[in-house]
Image (cartoon, rainbow, N blue to C red):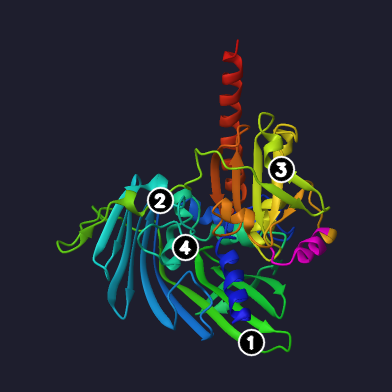
Amino acid sequence: MAVFHLIVTLLMTLAVAVPVLAVDPPATQPAMVDKLCSAVESLSSLAMTVQVRQEEEGQHIDTSRPPGNRSVRIEVLMAEGGRFREEAYEAGVLFAALVSDGKTLTEYDAKQQRWTRYPLSWRGRYDVNGLLLVKDQRLAWCDESWVDDDSPYSWWLTGVFQKANWKVGDGDTENIDGKKCYVFSAEKRMANGPATLTYTASLAFDCATYLPVRMETLISVSLENGLVIAKSADRYSYDNVRANAEVASGAFQFGAPAEAQLVDAESLRPKPSPLVGHAVPDVEFGMTDGTKVALSQYRGKAAVLLVFWATWCLPCKEELAVLPKLRGEFPEQELPIIAVNSDRDGRTACGFLKKHPLPFPVALDSNNEVGSRFHVKALPTTVLLDMNGTVVETWTGWGGADGLDKIRTVLRSLRKTTDEHENRQP
């Protein structure tokens, strides 16, 4: 059970390790990536049938989707202006649909006969998969990038294949269903204790059109003796791909069945942390150097950014790696950053820090005493307090460059409010 818990934990970190980071791509790939993305960016519309096969062996490890082996067909139509329509079928029966007219997004859960509608601008703010009602990552992937006026697979090209911590193939050619295709592949391994998680992905594009042909992802977990105890694979086949497809009138409108229940989207949005707007009691941190630091020592002097993290959490490491970029605008005396480590054994954190030192102090919270007081339910969790010790904002998960921008935006707003308050003082 301990190994299984580790697997699930690792996968949960992968589930939020989606965002794009600004890193240089491998030298052999930039031109190809540009061609692949621009091939779709220049289109007015794109239609395709996406055949998805979900395969599993051993433990169910991918918590972003239902368990078991499944085959799903998704009919996709995308057009300029953030418009798209997806209809997902299993055994020929519709089970979900997503429809956007460019301003609002409608989600329809046919199994539960429920639907909801909300501004398209909400998309991706509240859930890893970007959806509120239809909790199926396969649908989220099909239209995700088009909302940003980009290609339907650019997340892989810019988010995975250009990340420095992935082992990336150079883009060989292969014959697939009679088409000469460019094939990119990537692999990442994460070892923790007795288990190693291997995450591999590949993308194939038609050499003639630069349009997608196939995408495959595989997650496997193996023990030190080489025994594979779990596998999870998604295989996407892009069939009947039609560039600049004709868009029928009303294609991006949704008519709910009479028996379907309308669900208020506001009720589906995650509730803000109960801490926001409230002052937290004083907390004393035990630091890695053996000293004690009280949160109260910063009150009246500076805002504080707390980052709850662990050595096994990949998104945590990504956040910690880029937070120093804030220093150019927010110096240490204005914004102290404390990284609160949640590993059960503090020695694990200290060992990690010897190899990967951080440019800000690290506290140990092996018994989750501090984390529980800040309502930390998942990692990473980031908490911003103003100089009065009041919680201004909390973030769960890590959004890469977008996540850093969100933190920076709130910090600027907080600085402006503080300056205005000080200027009003006699």
Amino acid tagged 4: Trp
Q: Which mark is residue 44?
A: 2
Q: Compared with residue 392, is residue 366 higher up or lower down, i.e. above or below? A: below
CA separation in Å, label 4 and label 3: 44 Å
> Residue at label 4?
141
Q: State which mark lies toward you, 4 or 1.
A: 1
Q: Secondary structure at mark 2?
A: loop
* Quadrant in the rendering for residue 190: bottom right
Amino acid tagged 1: Val
Residue 289 relative to residue 307: left or right: right
Q: Which mark is residue 342?
A: none
Which SS does the magenta portion mostly show?
Answer: helix
- Please provide percent x and percent y for residue 158: 61, 56
Q: Is residue 91 among the parts visible in the rendering?
A: yes
Amino acid tagged 2: Ser
Q: State which mark lies toward you, 4 or 3.
A: 3
Please report whichever mark, 1 or 3, sits nearer to the chain's N-terminal start.
1
Whether the magenta-drawn stretch holds residue 350 is answered as yes
Q: Give the class, few, some or many, for how many residues have Cα within 10 Å of label 1's Cα (few <14, many ≥20).
A: some
Please report whichever mark, 2 or 1, sits nearer to the chain's N-terminal start.
2
Q: Nearer the viewer, residue 161 or 308?
A: 308
- Please provide percent x and percent y for residue 72: 38, 76
> Residue at label 1?
228
Q: Tell me whether circle 1 and circle 3 mark residues in contact (CB < 8 Å).
A: no
CA separation in Å, label 4 and label 1: 28 Å
Q: Secondary structure at mark 4?
A: helix
- Please provide percent x and percent y for residue 309: 66, 57
CA separation in Å, label 2 and label 1: 45 Å
Q: Tell me whether circle 2 and circle 1 mark residues in contact (CB < 8 Å).
A: no
Q: Secondary structure at mark 1?
A: strand
Provide the residue span drawn in magenta.
Answer: 343-353
